[in-house]
Image: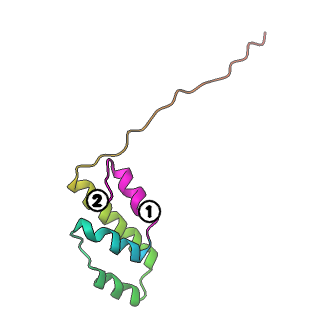
Amino acid sequence: MQMFETRDDVEEWLAPMNYEQFWREIKPWCLVLPYTRAQCDADIAAGEDRAEIMDFLKGLAEYALARRHNLKRRPVTVRPVLRVVSSRE
């Protein structure tokens, strides 16, 4: 089972998954999502865009895992800004 240190880790884990992988990979986490696979399958069969449904499901899963494990965003590293200065007189 995947271990997460930050919300970014969860997003990176979910990002490459397709529809089948998503349902298979989240099963061990026992996430309580407001939509079941059967409901999503029915929506896709009715003509809903699979990509939009996937984005929505991944967002729900990321939120649920982050909330359950109190995950925060990865700290942003700020790099110094270097400027080239010319001394033309």
Please name whichever residue, 56 or 68, is drawn nearer the observer in this view of the structure: 68
- Quadrant where the N terminus sits is bottom left
- Could you tell me the amino acid type at mark 1? Ala
Q: Which range of residues does the magenta coloring cover?
A: 1-17
Task: Locate residue 86 relative to residue 78 in the image: left or right.
Answer: right
Return the x and y of residue 39 as percentages of the image width and height: 29, 84
Number of numbered markers: 2
Most distant residue in the bottom direction: 46
Q: Quadrant of the C terminus?
A: top right
Real-space CA distance between mark 1 and mark 2, rounded to the nearest whole angstrom: 14 Å
Provide residue 26's location: percent of width, then percent of height: 30, 68
Q: Is residue 86 above or below residue 42?
A: above
**How is this picture coloured?**
rainbow
- Say whether residue 5 is left or right of residue 87: left
Considering the numbered disc 2 on the image, is that residue within a helix, a strand or a loop? helix
N-term-proximal mark, 1 vs 2: 1
Write down the quadrant of residue 43 in the picture.
Answer: bottom left
Q: Find residue 71 and report its horizontal and vertical position in percent.
A: 27, 49
**Which residue sits at x=26%, y=77%?**
35
Residue sitting at 73 percent across and 17 percent down? 86
Q: Residue at x 28, y 59 (%)?
A: 63
Dot 1: few (<14), some (14–19), or many (≥20) neighbours within 10 Å?
A: few
The residue lying toward the viewer, choosing from 54 and 88, is: 54
Q: Which residue is mark 1?
A: 15
* Disc 2 packing (10 Å; few <14; some 14–19; many ≥20): some
In the rendered image, residue 47 lying in the magenta stretch gets the answer no
Amino acid type shown at disc 2: Tyr
Judging depth in this view, the residue of 28 and 18 nearest the camera is 28
Towards the viewer: 88 or 34: 34
What residue sits right under mark 2 in the picture? 63
